[in-house]
Amino acid sequence: MSLARDIVEIATQTGRMIATAESCTGGMVAATLTDIPGASAAVERGFVTYTNGAKTEMLGVRPDTLAAHGAVSEEVAAEMAQGALAHAPVWIAVSITGIAGPGGSEFKPEGRVCFGIATAHHVATETVEFGARGRSEVRAAARDHALRLLLDGLRRDP
């Protein structure tokens, strides 16, 4: 994937290490990045935090944030990205939490995925409604979106 290759190349050239914090994608972003030869110069670690307990224990997501907003929220995505940044010697971290399906609810439908991107200077979140495309397609779309966020973050922040 040329997107992952570009990320690894830019991160390597700039000496910026990457961490991922993934829930619904189960490590797909980290796997895609580490498929690129030389990725060890850019990818420090990936956190797969599928449960709320893992989000709290591994990334420091606050239980009150989970209780107030639910795991699929921009608030949790922000804390996941910031937690990955705090728990790894990295320059940038991306997070993903969502409902790949099947299932969902009226308030949090299948295909809703929340993303976070964090550096020492910038934290941003966004929600994307991928729709009920099926589990595999939602997960792949979420992986690709997270990769674009990483690339944009590496290009944007000096």
Image (tube, grey):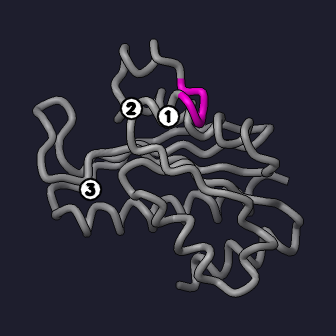
Rendered view: 60 above or below 36: above
Identify the residue shown where x is 54% and y is 26%: 61
Q: Which mark is residue 55?
A: 1
Viewer-proximal residue among 115 and 43? 43
Rendered view: 74 above or below 19: above
Q: Residues within 10 Å of mark 2 (few under 14, many from 20)?
A: many
Q: Residues within 10 Å of mark 3 (few under 14, many from 20)?
A: some
Identify the residue shown where x is 68% and y is 72%: 7
> Hey, which quadrant is residue 138 in on the image?
bottom left
Rendered view: 102 above or below 135: above
Which residues fall within the magenta stretch? 57-61
Q: Nearer the viewer, mark 2 or mark 1?
A: 1
Whole-number angstrom distance, CA of label 3 to CA of label 1: 23 Å
Identify the residue shown where x is 55% and y is 48%: 21
Viewer-proximal residue among 51 and 110? 51
58 drawn magenta: yes
Q: Nearer the viewer, mark 3 or mark 1?
A: 1
Image coordinates for residue 111, horizontal then vertical, percent: 24, 51
Q: Secondary structure at mark 2?
A: loop
Q: Which residue is mark 2?
A: 73
Whole-number angstrom distance, CA of label 3 to CA of label 2: 15 Å
Mark closest to the chain's N terminus, 3 or 2: 2
Q: Residues within 10 Å of mark 1 (few under 14, many from 20)?
A: many
The amino acid pointed to by label 3 is Phe
Q: Answer whether labels 3 and 2 touch (C-beta < 8 Å).
A: no
Q: Which mark is residue 122?
A: none
